[in-house]
Every structure is written in C-alpha cells, then in structure tokens.
Image (cartoon, rainbow, N blue to C red):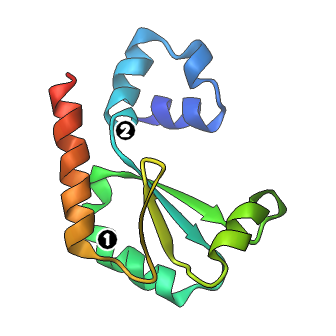
Amino acid sequence: MVLCFLSRTLQLGRYSCSPLGRHLCSTSANKPVLTLFTKKPCPLCDEAMEVLEPYKKRFVLQEVDITLPENSAWYDKYKYDIPVFHLNGKFLMKHQVDIQKFEDQLMKLELQDDGNQ
C-alpha cells in the first residue's frame, strides 16, 4: 500500500510501477472514484462525508476545491449546489447524500468490476 501511495503521489505509477507495485496498487485502482466538489468552509460537505464514512473502504475519494482558479468551470456550475458528488465521472447527487442511490450505484459498479475480472 505504501508503494501504491508513493507511486500515485509522485505520479510515477503509470511509468515505473513494477509488477509487484501494480499488484499492490490494483485494489485501489479498481475501486470506484467518488468525486466531491467542495469549498472551504462547507459544513454540508462535512456532514455528507460523515454519512459516507461506513462506505469509505469501497471507493477512492477525490476532492475538488471549486474555488481554485483551475476549477473555475466547476465553480460556475456548482457554486450554489455543494456538496456535489460524481461517481466515476458521472453526476450522482448534490446538496445531501441520497444513501439509497449511492448504495445502488456503488453496488452496480462493484458488480461490473467483478464481472470484468
């Protein structure tokens, strides 16, 4: 896991990750990516992440701070709607966690991944 973290952090994984490193990285690489569009402070985002806490081992969390200059398109789109969640790049929910929708979509992705192995 440390190798995976370091290779991802240094952006070396796709170029120099050894077969052993790829094996160690594969578990998180196969997890769905949950993207949280947020800004600081965001009490609703904090609340949403508490609701998702029991599921955190089943997805990789990617946070996007919409106030950063490079994220201005997301700011224009979501400035009044955070928290906003995408699952594997597709819009999933906004304002609050719809736990049933989240569970359904997460399970669907996990079943697809199991079928591809």
Residue 40, horizontal then vertical, whole percent: 66, 80
Identify which residue, 115 or 27, lies in the foreground.
Answer: 115
Identify which residue, 22 or 37, lies in the foreground.
Answer: 37
How many numbered marks appear?
2
Identify residue type, mark 1. Answer: Leu
Image height check: is 35 above or below 113?
A: below
- Quadrant where the N terminus lies? top left
- The extreme bottom residue here reads 43
At x 27%, y 51%, the residue is 58
Label 1 SS: helix
Which label number is shown at residue 75?
none
Identify which residue, 81 or 17, lies in the foreground.
Answer: 81
At x 68%, y 64%, the residue is 74
Residue that carries the numbered disc 2 in the rendered image: 28
Observer able to see residue 66? no
Q: Is residue 89 left or right of residue 71?
A: left
| Mark 1 nearby-residue class (10 Å; few <14, some 14–19, many ≥20) | some
Residue that carries the numbered disc 1 in the rendered image: 52
Label 2 SS: helix
| Mark 2 nearby-residue class (10 Å; few <14, some 14–19, many ≥20) | some
